[in-house]
Image (cartoon, helix red, strand yellow):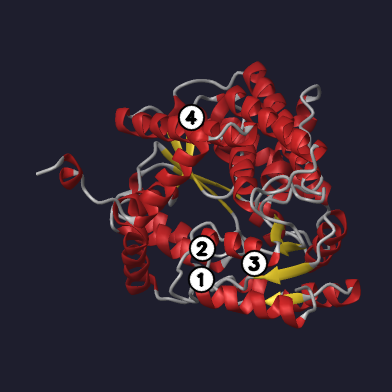
Amino acid sequence: MSEQQQQPKLNDYVQELLDNITALSKSDDPYDKVLIEYYQLRQARNARVKEAIAKGTPTASVGGNCVPELCVSLDMDVFQALEFPLFDAMMEGGLDGLHKLIDASAEMLGDNMCTFIRLAGAAMELNKCPKGTVVIGMSSICEAGSALQQLVRTNPVYKEIPSVSVESPGRREGISDEEALEYIAEQLKNDFVPFLEKHAGKKLDMDRLKFVCEESNEQLRLWWEYNELRRNKPCPSDWEVANFVNSVARYWGLGYPECKAWLKKLVDVCEQRVKEHRGITGIDEKIRVFWFDFPPIVWGNKVWPWLGKEFGAVMVMDLYSDNPPHTYINTSDEKQMWKDLAKRSSYDFGMPRIALGSADLYAKDTVRVVKDLSCDAVIWPGHMGHKDAGALVNIVQEQCRILKVPFLNLGCDLADDRYVSPDKIKDKIANFFQASGLA
């Protein structure tokens, strides 16, 4: 039997990933070399976390943002419940492996809540989630997120793991931001830190925390610089790399100097691409799109490269890669530092910022992103199970009407490519571009 015959056939997902990395490694483009460094960073981080879990070194399974600065300051790696089961399912079985996990989740939890939340719940019930030293949650108005936290409290394995939650008041009349931030800051100091210290086996060193916060500040500044560069026409970097940046800068790379160094390299190469008037490789940019929700990380590469080549369409921003004015942590004033940490963890980023904010925030984000990035269209993906977002779609649609920017309410699923197939999504977006006069 030949060596080629002896090699097991790789699934499509793994083969595509390897082909992409191989192509990047052969490229002389500095941008591609930085992307190779990203894959190396992520692999090293994943190996470090899995080794820590296996050895029983303190780790934290988290939901939301959950103040990773405090965990990192206590030398606790953080990971999200779904990230390894999702990656493992696709590495082992490609999209078929993911489909099996999605189907199992529907049998357990029904098929009408956010697919990522269902996947996390199923992975937990099937004993596929890594077990950290502690579990950290945050309050949420998302009913699916709340259901997942209830699963954590009732699962035979997870309920034995010490857990803590940070309660964040929603922004509403009668509660000022100052009152809310003082409330959250008191929780962090009096409940969260003693809990982490107990299970990390060490006391929080305030100098170490200040250092991590300053590193975090710099990473967020670099993220902001990267997004500023994406204002340029043509856009120097694509939606998938933007998703890499937000995961590094606000989640698993937060507070790590090597991740700050990577962000700096990416900003530098994007600046050079802007100077050279270079856009995304292989795309003659003509249509700039704001994707108003979580990016399509599972099936996006089956849609956006085609849209780019066919129509010159570029996703210049998505809602979670957006980096609106964020809180720089003031490390020179300890009382203010705790309030800044409170604000960053609750009202600054991603889903907590949106879910705990007001409906008016959707309108303001629409106007800001469309104007700042010169967007030609807004696509609302309408992810299945995103009920809080679905209730506010008309607000965004009305702002787009005022701005005279075409708006598409797509209807899809953020993980399951069978809910609406990539081919149908391509057809819907293509028809939208043509009907709107953009193509």
State the CA–CA distance, disc 2 to disc 3: 13 Å
State the CA–CA distance, disc 4 to disc 2: 36 Å
The secondary structure type at the circle numbered 2 is helix
Q: Position of residue 313 (x, y in %)?
A: 70, 63
Answer whether residue 216 is visible to the viewer in this image.
no
State the CA–CA distance, disc 1 to disc 4: 39 Å
Q: Earlier in the sequence, mark 2 or mark 1?
A: 2
State the CA–CA distance, disc 3 to disc 1: 15 Å
The secondary structure type at the circle numbered 1 is helix
Asked if 308 appears above or below 132 in the picture, the reply is below
Residue located beneath label 2 in the image: 302
Of labels 4 and 3, the one closer to you: 3
Q: Residues within 10 Å of mark 2 (few under 14, many from 20)?
A: some
Along the line of sight, which residue is nearer the eye, 162 or 100? Answer: 100
Q: Position of residue 158 (x, y in %)?
A: 35, 49
Using residue 171 as the reference point, say whether residue 7 is left or right of it.
left
Q: Position of residue 62 (x, y in %)?
A: 50, 45
Q: Earlier in the sequence, mark 4 or mark 2?
A: 4
Along the line of sight, which residue is nearer the eye, 35 or 93? Answer: 35
- Mark number for residue 422? 1
Of labels 4 and 2, the one closer to you: 2
- Mark number for residue 310? 3
The image quarter containing residue 190 is top right
Using residue 358 as the reference point, say whether residue 67 is left or right of it.
left
Q: Earlier in the sequence, mark 1 or mark 4?
A: 4
